[in-house]
Image (cartoon, helix red, strand yellow):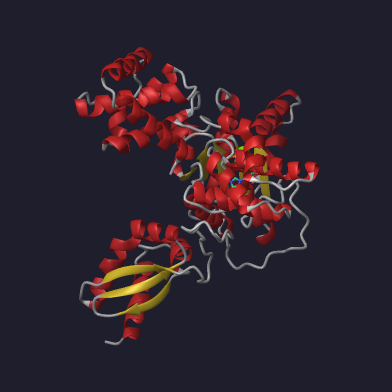
């Protein structure tokens, strides 16, 4: 057989899977339309995918199905491998390069013809678009999902929940979805609202007896973006209302996107049925950016401000502001303002002087219990489920105590909240665990540095 025959086998594989309804048309459009056959021989066939995200999803969802069908058709066992081709027809994910010299920071989106003449969306910030969003280690999965939603709202990622700490880009990414649809799929009605406003409008609608107006407003949209849904904690009636809105839109295959400052499992005073709706779709998290990404973000922001700040100063800021992007931007703005006002050249010394206070103030935000559990579990070679589970062997009790201790040290969660996240343990257990670690530290000189290292990892994220 020659290479081309394998292309025919590939086409036939997909055709038969669709015919046998093992692959829906929607799935095909989502995952296979942008895949290209590259080459084949009697050992393997190679296909191109537009991004790592596609790659991981396709492998996870379809690889065994594809290999089986291809095996049936060719009568031999062929490996299917993928190459990530950034310039194929759909978007190309640009990850921040290893070298910090010139990271490419563009996020490319599918080739639709945007209606550039369209009036801006009233609820969305125009500068919150995909082009302005730098993709790095911390957010590439979330950004790819956002782009996929932008080009196919109501498709495979519905609902989508983006979660992460403050200032990590949740609102930016959510609004980028909205802006993208607003300009590219102009017949779709996009509504963006913060959970807080949603609550207030709902309460107002009850007081003024305009509930049906309220209902209609949110049930007649194609894309509903609700920001900061953690603000709905304790708001039972609004949650109830959102639950019904959710169902109506979901059933009509309308796109829902939410942001939250924690994973849904950590939401408190939330009805289970609404929480389970959030968990049903795609949950993606935004982590604090690493150095390369921070540096790339600064460069990008600097370019858009039309300011020249020396490379070594950018690097200095990127090294020292580690928590979130909002703080990073604030430091840059401060340096630019200083340069304008004082008319002096900005040097690393000036930056040191001016940003002193920001550096000390910017630790400890943004840390979820989930994050601590993951880092500690990895360090001790157990799983987060072990930490939350019932097992009481030494291999898990010690890491569990360390995790609780660290959460106590670097976050504001109460012992009750911590206990809940460790399989519903009592707050006295948490207090006792923290005490145990403190006691052990007195006798074991290696424990404190180990905890310090873990805390650095948790805060730094590489
Ligand atoms: P959150 O909603 O998570 O608190 P925001 O979306 O408000 O965070 O982001 C804070 C600021 O940081 C915004 O000005 C946003 O444009 C910027 N920002 C966050 N992440 C990125 C990124 N990856 N690339 C460029 N700017 C970013
Ligand atoms: Mg926000």
- Does 262 sit left or right of 444 as displayed? right
User: In the picture shown, does residue 432 fall above or below 420?
Assistant: above
Residue drawn at 63 percent across, 41 percent down: 349
Residue drawn at 65 percent across, 31 percent down: 196
Residue drawn at 53 percent across, 37 percent down: 323
Where ligand 1 lies, by image quadrant?
top right
**Quadrant of the image occupied by residue 406:** top left
- Does 304 sit left or right of 412 as displayed? right
User: In the picture shown, does residue 5 fall above or below 166?
Assistant: below
User: In the picture shown, does residue 10 fall above or below 306?
Assistant: below
In percent of width and height, residue 289 lies at 51, 45
Q: Is residue 158 visible?
A: no
In percent of width and height, residue 426 lies at 35, 15
In percent of width and height, residue 219 lies at 64, 43
In percent of width and height, residue 418 lies at 41, 22
Q: Is residue 91 visible?
A: yes
- Does 47 sit left or right of 126 as displayed? left
Quadrant location of the C terminus in the rendered image: top left
Question: Which of 358 and 47 lies nearest the eye of the viewer?
Answer: 358
């Amino acid at each position: 057989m020659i290479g081309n025959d394998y292309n025919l086998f590939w086409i036939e594989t997909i055709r038969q899977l669709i015919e046998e309804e093992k692959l829906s048309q929607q799935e095909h459009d989502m995952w296979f339309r942008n895949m290209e056959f590259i080459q084949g021989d009697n050992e393997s066939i190679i296909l191109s995918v537009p991004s790592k995200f596609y790659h991981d999803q396709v492998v996870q969802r379809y690889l065994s199905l594809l290999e089986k069908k291809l095996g049936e058709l060719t009568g031999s066992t062929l490996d299917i491998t993928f190459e990530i081709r950034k310039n194929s027809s759909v978007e190309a994910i640009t990850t921040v390069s290893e070298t910090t010299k010139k990271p490419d920071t563009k996020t490319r989106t599918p080739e639709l013809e945007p209606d550039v003449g369209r009036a801006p969306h009233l609820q969305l910030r125009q500068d919150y678009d995909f082009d302005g969003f730098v993709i790095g280690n911390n957010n590439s999965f979330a950004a790819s999902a956002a782009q996929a939603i932008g080009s196919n709202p109501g498709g495979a990622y519905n609902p989508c929940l983006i979660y992460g700490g403050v200032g990590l880009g949740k609102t930016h990414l959510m609004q980028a979805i909205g802006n993208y649809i607003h300009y590219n799929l102009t017949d779709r009605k996009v509504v963006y609202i913060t959970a807080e406003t949603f609550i207030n409008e709902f309460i107002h609608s009850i007081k003024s007896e305009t509930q049906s107006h309220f209902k209609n407003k949110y049930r007649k949209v194609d894309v509903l973006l609700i920001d900061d849904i953690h603000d709905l904690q304790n708001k039972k009636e609004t949650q109830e209302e959102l639950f019904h809105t959710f169902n109506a839109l979901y059933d009509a295959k309308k796109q829902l996107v939410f942001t939250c400052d924690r994973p849904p499992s950590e939401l408190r005073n939330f009805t289970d049925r609404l929480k389970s709706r959030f968990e049903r779709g795609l949950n993606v998290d935004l982590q604090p950016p690493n150095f390369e990404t921070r540096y790339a973000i600064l460069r990008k922001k600097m370019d858009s401000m039309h300011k020249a700040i020396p490379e070594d100063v950018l690097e200095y800021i990127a090294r020292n502001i580690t928590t979130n992007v909002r703080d990073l931007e604030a430091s840059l703005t401060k340096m630019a303002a200083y340069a304008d006002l004082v008319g002096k050249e900005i040097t690393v010394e000036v930056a040191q002087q001016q940003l002193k206070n920001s550096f000390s103030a910017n630790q400890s935000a943004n840390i979820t219990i989930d994050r601590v559990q993951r880092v500690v579990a990895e360090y001790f070679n157990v799983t987060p489920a072990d930490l939350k589970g019932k097992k009481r062997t030494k291999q898990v009790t010690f890491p569990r105590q360390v995790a609780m201790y660290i959460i106590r040290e670097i976050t504001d969660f109460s012992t009750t909240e911590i206990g809940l996240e460790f399989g519903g343990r009592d707050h006295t257990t948490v207090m006792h665990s923290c005490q145990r670690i403190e006691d052990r530290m007195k006798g074991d000189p290696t424990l404190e540095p180990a905890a310090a290292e873990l805390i650095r990892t948790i805060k730094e994220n590489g």
